[in-house]
């Protein structure tokens, strides 16, 4: 008696159908897609809903371009600027990919504003969506952290000085400020540890947290369901629903293509510039953050003395807390914006103030002639740097310089070391090759006389290795052994 | 009762799974679209090292070509060799021999002995190159005369540009009969 075998599921004749059936039997992809694409949207698909998925697309673009940039990047204060300029000036498509990545952060900030604005205007945070909102707030903070840490990595003038100012702010935090600043910088001053720390934050820690919170955000969104238009009940939707696919999917996809398209056009037309390498000694440089941090930067200019603590730390903290608490404070289910003047009004007021501060910052910079001249000079400097050819960095090689400044007898010994072909086997600068060992440290092993004797008449072990007796006059032999004895 | 609860749990589980899959699908689809749109530049970016670029750094200046016009015997010249490693260069000093011109063409020899790599020296008195290590000897044009070296001295590629004699410095494999450049 044989066990009855379950018949193979009936497969379509078309190749794609068969491939799909094959894949589905092994992955269950059809039901996953079904779940994903049939999400009901009450009140129908709308362009107003594309910002969330637009952010996801931009984030993916940052992840992909970012991963590729690390093919070349080196997080170290003495190499970072050289490698970025190598990428930009030498590597194919390097400038383009870096520009997509750098402008992508601005793109994320813009779409983030639209996403938050839409959520507030539509009251989409209402009706058991507190966790959805909170995870969004954390995502926003993480995103701002990403742009702050990423800005330093090219280690050009503006990156260096903007970060120096930004990390100076940390010292304002009461009690633990100075300690915290030292921790973030990896020392009292900005340096190579700062770049390592920012790199780790930018590449491992913050993206890891971002992915975790995106997963949470989407999870909460799916649990609560799409909030729908402003006349929809946020808890028990009443409007007729249409599935996510095809209309909303197509809108989201179209928006994604437009976003990447805009980025690509800007990246191609106006490549992101790279300024000259950071020079901490430059006292004229006017540090300026990225445009979206400009308003905060301007705000700090108005504060001095004890107000800098209130205005620079306490007020923004309260503002952030109030913002995060919006779904807890605004609990009514009313969603029409004109019926919610406080929330919507406060948000618009904040937008107006923030934009105003931003404009004031640019106005200040370009209305004072001396300041404007310096700003233009900084722009011209980075243009000039962009247009100059790539200059490779000189690797290591301290020894020739050492020898040049050394005692004349050592210089003579070094010359003999080369002319006697000692270097052929013992290596340039006596660091050893496959043929013969390094001679560094012989000074500790042998006295002057012992070494000269060995050179004149090598021992058995040495001759077995191919060492020839050095036939030199006493004076030259002395120079050679002096040179050898000072190697370390 | 217990059965009902179990069923409820199961439904919850499957809902959670579908939500997780939804996120994964979103990541996968958006990643695929972005990756697709940027595929070409990303490909060019990554495969850049496959592009064979002949960098100027390969050529080292030996000196004004006119200085060597009236040579009667080989002279040793110290040159600076720049080795380019992506965004770094390492420069080192090394010597080459410039030979007296033959039909107006200057020939340059590497001083590295093809036997075991010692620096071959020109001996004016004997009118030949002699290697100090195992007494290999070579004629004025680098032809092997005798001793352990398996081949003649290695000629280096050279050119005259704007009146300056330039050489492309290379290392060659030792102990073999033919000249094999090392990468
Ligand atoms: S290394 Fe020149 S003859 Fe042996």
Image: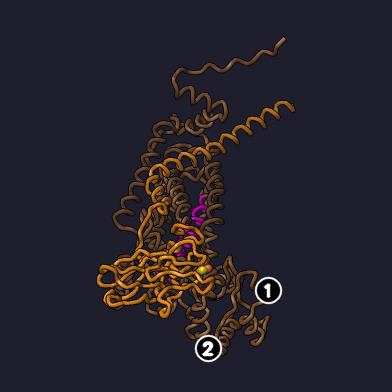
Chain colours: A brown, B orange
Q: Is residue B164 above or below residue A142?
A: below
Q: Residue furthest right?
A: B2
User: In the picture shown, does residue A205 fall above or below A432?
Assistant: above
Residue A116 appears in the rendering: no
What numbered label is drawn on residue A460? Answer: 1
Indicate the quadrant where residue A242 lies.
top left
Q: Is residue A158 magenta?
A: yes
Q: State the SS at label 1.
A: helix
Residue at image position (45%, 30%) is A243
Label 2 neighbour load within 10 Å: few <14, some 14-19, many 20+: some
A194 on left or right of A367: right
Give the camera-side residue of B26 and A418.
A418
Question: How far apart, in angstroms, are the residues tagged by discs 2 and 1?
Answer: 29 Å
Q: Quadrant of the N terminus of chain B?
A: top right
Q: Which residue is mark 2?
A: A409
Q: Relative to A290, is A196 on the left or the right?
A: right
Marks 2 and 1 in Cβ contact (< 8 Å): no
**Residue A261: horizontal and vertical position, in percent?**
34, 46
- Magenta stretch contains residue A426: no
Q: Residue A134 — which label?
A: none
Q: Position of residue A422 (x, y in %)?
A: 54, 75
How many residues crowd around disc 1 within 10 Å: few (fewer than 14), some, or many (20 or more)?
A: few
Disc 1 chain ID = A
- List x then y, in percent, for residue A93: 36, 53
Q: Which numbered disc, 2 or 1, marks the residue that appears first in the sequence?
A: 2
Considering depth in this image, is B126 or A92 the residue closer to the camera? Answer: B126
Are discs 2 and 1 located on one and the same chain? Answer: yes
Q: Residue at x 56, y 52 (%)?
A: A208
x 46%, y 46%: residue? A56
B177, A134: nearer the viewer: B177
Question: Considering only vertical position in the picture, is A218 above or below A199?
Answer: above
Q: Give the residues drawn in magenta, as a range.
A: A136-161
């Amino acid at each position: 008696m044989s066990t009855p075998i379950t018949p193979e599921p009936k497969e379509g004749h078309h190749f794609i159908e068969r491939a799909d059936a094959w894949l589905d039997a092994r992955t269950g992809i059809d039901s996953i897609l079904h779940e994903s694409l049939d999400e009901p949207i009450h009140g129908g698909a709308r362009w107003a809903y594309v910002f969330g998925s637009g952010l996801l697309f931009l984030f993916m673009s940052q992840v992909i371009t970012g991963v590729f940039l690390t093919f070349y990047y080196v997080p170290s204060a003495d190499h970072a600027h050289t490698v970025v300029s190598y990428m930009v000036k030498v590597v194919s498509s390097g400038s383009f990919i870096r520009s997509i990545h750098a402008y992508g952060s601005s793109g994320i900030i813009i779409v983030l504003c639209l996403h938050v604005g839409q959520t507030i205007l539509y009251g989409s945070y209402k009706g058991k969506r507190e966790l959805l909102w909170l995870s969004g707030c954390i995502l926003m903070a993480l995103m701002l952290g990403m742009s702050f840490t990423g800005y330093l990595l090219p280690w050009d003038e503006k990156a260096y000085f903007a970060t120096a100012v930004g990390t100076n702010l940390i010292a304002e935090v009461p009690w633990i400020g100075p300690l915290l600043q030292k921790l973030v910088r990896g020392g009292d001053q900005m340096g190579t540890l700062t770049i390592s720390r920012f790199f780790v934050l930018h590449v491992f820690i913050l993206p890891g947290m971002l992915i975790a919170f995106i997963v949470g955000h989407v999870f909460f969104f799916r649990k609560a369901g799409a909030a729908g238009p402003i006349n929809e009940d946020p808890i028990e939707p009443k409007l007729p629903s249409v599935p996510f696919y095809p209309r909303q999917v197509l809108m989201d996809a179209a928006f994604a293509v437009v976003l990447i398209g805009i980025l690509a056009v800007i990246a191609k037309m106006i490549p992101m510039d790279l300024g000259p390498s950071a020079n901490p000694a430059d006292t004229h440089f006017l540090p300026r953050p990225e445009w979206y941090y400009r308003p905060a930067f301007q705000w700090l200019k108005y504060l001095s003395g004890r107000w800098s603590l209130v205005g620079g730390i306490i007020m923004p903290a309260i503002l952030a807390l109030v913002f995060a608490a919006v779904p807890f404070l605004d609990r009514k289910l009313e969603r029409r914006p004109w019926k919610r003047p406080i929330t919507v009004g406060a948000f618009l007021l904040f937008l107006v103030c923030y934009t105003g501060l931003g404009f004031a910052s640019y106005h200040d910079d370009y209305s004072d002639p001396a300041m404007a001249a310096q700003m233009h000079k900084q722009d011209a400097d980075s243009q000039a740097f962009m247009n100059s050819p790539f200059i490779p960095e000189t690797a290591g090689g301290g020894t020739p310089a050492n020898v040049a400044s050394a005692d004349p007898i050592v210089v003579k010994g070094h010359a003999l070391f080369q002319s006697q072909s000692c270097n052929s086997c013992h290596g340039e600068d006596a660091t050893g090759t496959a043929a013969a060992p390094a001679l560094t440290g012989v000074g500790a092993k042998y006295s002057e006389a012992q070494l000269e004797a060995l050179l004149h008449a090598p021992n058995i072990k040495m001759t077995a290795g191919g060492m020839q007796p050095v036939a030199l006059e006493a004076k030259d032999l002395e120079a050679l052994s002096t040179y050898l004895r000072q190697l370390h | 009762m217990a059965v009902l609860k179990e069923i409820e749990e199961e439904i919850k589980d499957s809902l959670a799974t579908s939500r997780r899959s939804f996120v994964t699908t979103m990541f996968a689809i958006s990643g695929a679209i972005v990756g697709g749109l940027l595929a070409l530049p990303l490909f060019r970016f990554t495969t850049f090292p496959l592009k064979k670029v002949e960098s100027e750094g390969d050529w080292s200046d030996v000196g004004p070509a006119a200085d060597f016009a009236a040579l009667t015997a080989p002279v040793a010249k110290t040159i600076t060799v720049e080795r380019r490693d992506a965004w770094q260069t390492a420069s080192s000093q090394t010597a080459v021999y410039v030979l007296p011109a033959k039909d107006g063409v200057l020939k340059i020899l590497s001083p590295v002995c093809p036997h075991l790599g010692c620096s071959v020296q020109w001996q004016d008195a004997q009118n030949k190159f002699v290697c100090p290590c195992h007494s290999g000897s070579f004629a004025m044009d680098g032809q092997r005369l005798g001793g352990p070296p398996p081949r003649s001295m290695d000629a280096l590629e050279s050119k005259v540009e704007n009146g300056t004699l330039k050489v492309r410095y290379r290392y060659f494999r030792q102990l073999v009969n033919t000249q094999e450049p090392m990468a």
